[in-house]
Image (cartoon, rainbow, N blue to C red):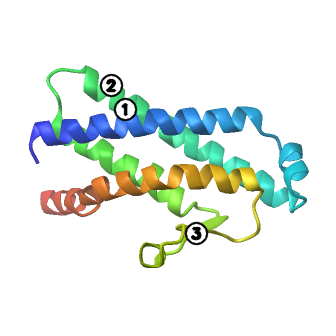
């Protein structure tokens, strides 16, 4: 890929991460476990785990955003390092969104065919968590489609360089 394409993707990802960080931080700054329990009586430990997972996701997104801003402000643009960063963002942010490591929710792989939302929960989440993830899902889908290339291409480059 040319520098201009990678740089354009980096700019797109930067905008996506800025919006995502703002939405997640806004939600997390206003939300407590007690507030979630007031929304819907449920499993307190599950709700705490949901908030913890959202905090981890926002940290990954903030780190990715910082990296994007550094790359986009430096000249000359370092294509190979930017590709490595986009690969990392794909794994830390996008994959974590659709399949968090503690399996509180998971992606329904048939959602593209059924027209339903991609996120399914192990237990019933509070409505605000469901609404939050639903509001973010379409943007994560778009960026995933943009960055899936790095999943195969970057790995191929790493293997070939050995």
> Hey, which quadrant is residue 82 in on the image?
top left
Q: Classify mark 1: helix, strand or loop.
A: helix
Q: Identify the mark nearer the N-term, 1 or 3.
A: 1
Mark 2 touches mark 3? (CB < 8 Å):
no
Give the farthest residue toward the front: 115
Residue displayed at 53% across by 49% down? 136
Q: Mark 1 points at which residue?
A: 67
Q: Mark 2 points at which residue?
A: 70
The x and y percentages for residue 128 are 73, 50
The x and y percentages for residue 142 are 36, 54
Q: Can residue 81 be seen in this view?
A: no
Mark 1 touches mark 2? (CB < 8 Å):
yes
Looking at the image, residue 14 sits to the left or right of residue 57; the answer is left
Find residue 102 and name its label. none
Mark 1: give few (<14), some (14-19) or many (20+) Cα within 10 Å: some
> Hey, which quadrant is residue 69 in on the image?
top left
Q: Can residue 8 be seen in this view?
A: yes
The x and y percentages for residue 72 are 26, 26
Mark 2: give few (<14), some (14-19) or many (20+) Cα within 10 Å: few
The answer to which of 4 and 78 lies nearer the viewer is 4
Q: Name the residue under label 3.
A: 106
């Amino acid at each position: 890929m040319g520098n201009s394409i990678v740089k354009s993707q980096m700019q797109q990802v930067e905008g996506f991460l800025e919006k995502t960080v703002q939405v997640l931080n806004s939600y997390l700054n206003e939300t407590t476990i007690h507030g979630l329990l007031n929304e819907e009586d449920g499993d307190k430990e599950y709700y705490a785990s949901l908030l913890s997972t959202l905090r981890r996701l926002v940290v990954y997104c903030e780190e990715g955003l910082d990296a994007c801003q550094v790359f986009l402000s430096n000249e000359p643009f370092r294509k190979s390092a930017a590709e490595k960063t986009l690969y990392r963002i794909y794994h830390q942010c996008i994959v974590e969104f659709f399949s968090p490591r503690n399996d509180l929710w998971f992606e329904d792989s048939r959602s593209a065919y059924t027209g339903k939302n991609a996120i399914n929960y192990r237990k019933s989440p509070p409505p605000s968590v469901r609404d939050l993830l639903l509001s973010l899902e379409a943007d994560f889908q778009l960026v995933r489609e943009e960055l899936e290339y790095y999943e195969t291409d970057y790995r191929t480059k790493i293997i070939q360089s050995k």
